[in-house]
Amino acid sequence: MTIDFDWDNEKAKVNIRKHGVSFTDATTVFDDPLSITLDDTLHSQEEDRFLIIGYSQQQMLLVVAYTYRGNNIRIISARIATRRERKIYEQGN
């Protein structure tokens, strides 16, 4: 099954400047079989949002915020995991 991704191009540029992570790299976290998905209740006023913690193909442990838009996964932000998030990933696996 192929997953289709989309995102706002301007937000993607800002994300690279702010966090040093491209949304293209962020999509590879969804291939990590050990990834952990959490509800993002803090930022979920208008729509259901989720956080996935997992390793990218570049072997960076990332946290990616996303939502579903139709059949697509819409990337909202991506950054390197904090020490706390790394612990969540390690304890989940």
Image (tube, helix red, strand yellow):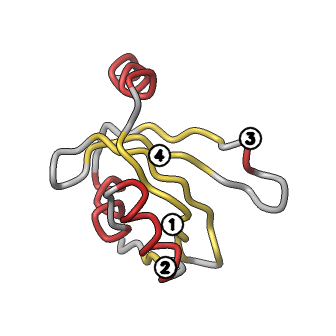
* C-alpha separation, residue under disc 2 versus residue under disc 4: 16 Å
* C-alpha separation, residue under disc 2 versus residue under disc 1: 6 Å
Whole-percent x, y for residue 16 in the image: 36, 65
* Secondary structure under the numbered disc 4 in the rendered image: strand
Q: Is residue 23 above or below residue 18?
A: below
Sequence-wise, the earlier of marks 3 and 1 is 3
The residue beneath circle 1 is 75
Q: Say which mark, if any, is on residue 42.
A: 3
Q: Is residue 63 above or below residue 74?
A: above
Crowding at label 4, few (<14), some or many (≥20) Cα neighbours within 10 Å? many
Q: Is residue 36 above or below residue 43?
A: above
Which residue, as the protein is rendered here, is positioned at the far left? 58
Name the residue at 33% across, 21% down. Answer: 90
Which residue, as the protein is rendered here, is positioned at the far right? 45
- In front of the other: 19 or 29: 19
Q: In which quarter of the view is residue 40 placed?
A: top right
- In front of the other: 66 or 11: 11
Tag 4: residue type?
Ile
Tag 3: residue type?
Leu
* Secondary structure under the numbered disc 1 in the rendered image: strand
In this rendering, would 78 be left or right of 46?
left
Check the picture and name the quadrant holding the N terminus. Answer: bottom left
* Secondary structure under the numbered disc 3 in the rendered image: helix
Whole-percent x, y for residue 43 in the image: 73, 49
* C-alpha separation, residue under disc 1 versus residue under disc 4: 11 Å
Check the picture and name the quadrant holding the C terminus. Answer: top left
Sequence-wise, the earlier of marks 2 and 1 is 2
Whole-percent x, y for residue 63 in the image: 43, 45
Q: Say which mark, if any, is on residue 52.
A: 4
2 or 3: mark nearer the eye: 3
Q: Say which mark, if any, is on residue 6.
A: 2
Tag 2: residue type?
Asp
